[in-house]
Amino acid sequence: QVQLVESGGGLVQAGGSLRLSCAASGRTFSTAAMAWFRQAPGKEREFVATITSAGGTLYARSVRGRFTISRDNAKKMSYLQMNSLKPEDTAVYYCATGQWSVEKRSYDYWGQGTQVTVSS
């Protein structure tokens, strides 16, 4: 069993930055992909970014150029650096691990989520 815990969410003004962290524990696999998804009120959970064990990355078009996903396999951590934040980025952000993909169903384990609110 794998447990994921996100942290780093909060309230920021548009144009600001925030760094989210995801700590993994349990039966984790360094070869598994890690990803970040987000869900705004009334909307479906959507893909944000993913990173392979080798460091290959893929971003949603809405965040490309502003967000950076990274990982530290030794620490079992993943991070999402968010810059130039927009009000549209407001959502609960979830980290996940599993098979590399942009699809929610490909990820086996999920964190509890951390709220990110961007004011204008």
Image (tube, rainbow, N blue to C red):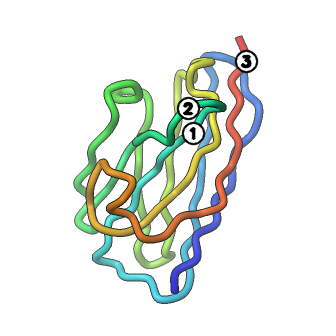
94 sits left or right of 71 in the view: right
Q: Report the amino acid beneath label 3.
A: Ser
In whole angstroms, how far apart are the C-alphas of marks 2 and 3? 19 Å
Q: Kindly identify which residue carries mark 1.
A: 39
Residue 30 vs 107, above or below: the answer is below
Q: Position of residue 114 (x, y in %)?
A: 68, 49
Q: Are marks 2 and 1 in contact (CB under 8 Å)?
A: yes
Residue lying at the far top in this picture: please name it: 120
Counting residues from the start of the chain, the first of labels 3 and 1 encountered is 1
Task: Residue type at mark 2: give it.
Answer: Lys
Mark 2 or mark 3, earlier in chain: 2
State which mark lies toward you, 3 or 1: 1
Residue 112 lies in quadrant: bottom right
Answer few, some or many: residues within 10 Å of disc 3's Cα (few below 14, many 20 plus, some between 14 and 19). Answer: some
Marks 3/1 in contact by CB < 8 Å: the verdict is: no
So how many labels did they put on this image? 3
Q: What's the mark number on residue 119?
A: 3
Indicate the secondary structure of the residue bearing disc 1: strand
The CA distance from mark 3 to mark 1 is: 17 Å
**Residue at position x 53%, y 41% in the image:** 38
Please identify the quarter of the rendering in which residue 43 is found: top right
Residue at mark 2? 43
As displayed, is residue 48 above or below residue 79? above
